[in-house]
């Protein structure tokens, strides 16, 4: 304990703050999302769907991450319905639709059909510097994680229902 106090004193005496040091700790996609309260609904959904282990793997993955506000735009009761155990597979398919295998940085995004982790394709469009995936706007880009990158979107995107 004495060593830890001495270390903290030495670090602060050198002008470093502890949060700045902690920021250098690299986190995977799940840990990065969990550290941001704007993604609490997404993290809860990932846990309910059982996709946390997949998103913790080596990757790399590109995740188009809807914020809590994006989930709030869904019709009332949708999130609660999806979080029920009997809807686990549907929720898993929706969340996997937000994941593209590989690491795609904002500078590399182009208009295309992107094959998602659930097997369906999502429409990515670049128009005058603005990027959309399906009907969602990409509002923040290039949040780095050890196993990929997160791009923040303002709506939850839904794969087409399979007949």
Image (tube, rainbow, N blue to C red):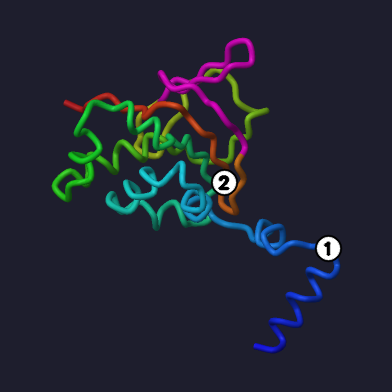
Q: Position of residue 119 (x, y in %)?
A: 35, 34
Q: Residue at x 21, y 29 (%)?
A: 76
Q: Which residue is the site of mark 2?
A: 148
Identify the magenta region. 122-142
Judged from the image, the secondary structure of the residue bearing numbered disc 2 is: strand
Corner quadrant of residue 126: top right
In this figure, what is the number of numbered marks?
2
Q: Residue at x 23, y 45 (%)?
A: 83
Q: Residue at x 57, y 57 (%)?
A: 27
Between residue 80 and residue 130, name the one nearer to us: 80
**Left or right of 87, for residue 140:** right
Q: Residue at x 41, y 20 (%)?
A: 134
**Left or right of 126, for residue 107:** right
Q: Position of residue 30 (x, y in %)?
A: 47, 52
- The answer to whether mark 1 and mark 2 are in CB contact below 8 A is no
**Left or right of 87, for residue 127:** right
Name the disc covering residue 158, or none.
none
Compared to residue 18, the image places residue 72 above or below, namely above
Locate the N terminus by quadrant: bottom right
Q: Which residue is the site of mark 1?
A: 15
Locate the C terminus by quadrant: top left
Judged from the image, the secondary structure of the residue bearing numbered disc 1 is: loop
Residue found at the far bottom of this picture: 2
Q: Position of residue 41 (x, y in %)?
A: 36, 43
Q: Position of residue 155 (x, y in %)?
A: 40, 26
Look at discs 1 and 2 and give the one toward the viewer. Answer: 1
**Left or right of 105, for residue 115:** left
Compared to residue 163, the image places residue 25 above or below, namely below
Magenta stretch: dominant SS?
strand
Residue found at the far right of this picture: 14
Corner quadrant of residue 91: top left
């Amino acid at each position: 304990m004495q060593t830890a106090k001495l270390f903290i004193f030495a670090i602060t005496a050198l002008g470093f703050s502890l949060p700045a040091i902690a920021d250098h700790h690299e986190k995977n996609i799940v840990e990065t999302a969990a550290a941001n309260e704007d993604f609490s609904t997404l993290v809860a959904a990932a846990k309910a769907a059982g996709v946390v282990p997949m998103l913790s793997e080596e990757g790399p993955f590109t995740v188009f991450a809807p914020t809590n506000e994006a989930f709030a735009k869904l019709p009332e009761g949708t999130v609660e319905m999806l979080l029920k155990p009997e809807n686990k597979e549907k929720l898993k398919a929706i969340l996997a639709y937000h994941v593209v295998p590989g690491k795609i940085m904002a500078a590399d995004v182009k208009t295309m059909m992107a094959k998602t982790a659930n097997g369906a394709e999502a429409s990515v469009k670049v128009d005058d510097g603005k990027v959309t995936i399906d009907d969602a706007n990409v509002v923040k880009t290039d949040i780095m994680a050890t196993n990929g990158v997160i791009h923040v979107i303002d709506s939850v995107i839904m794969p087409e229902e399979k007949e």
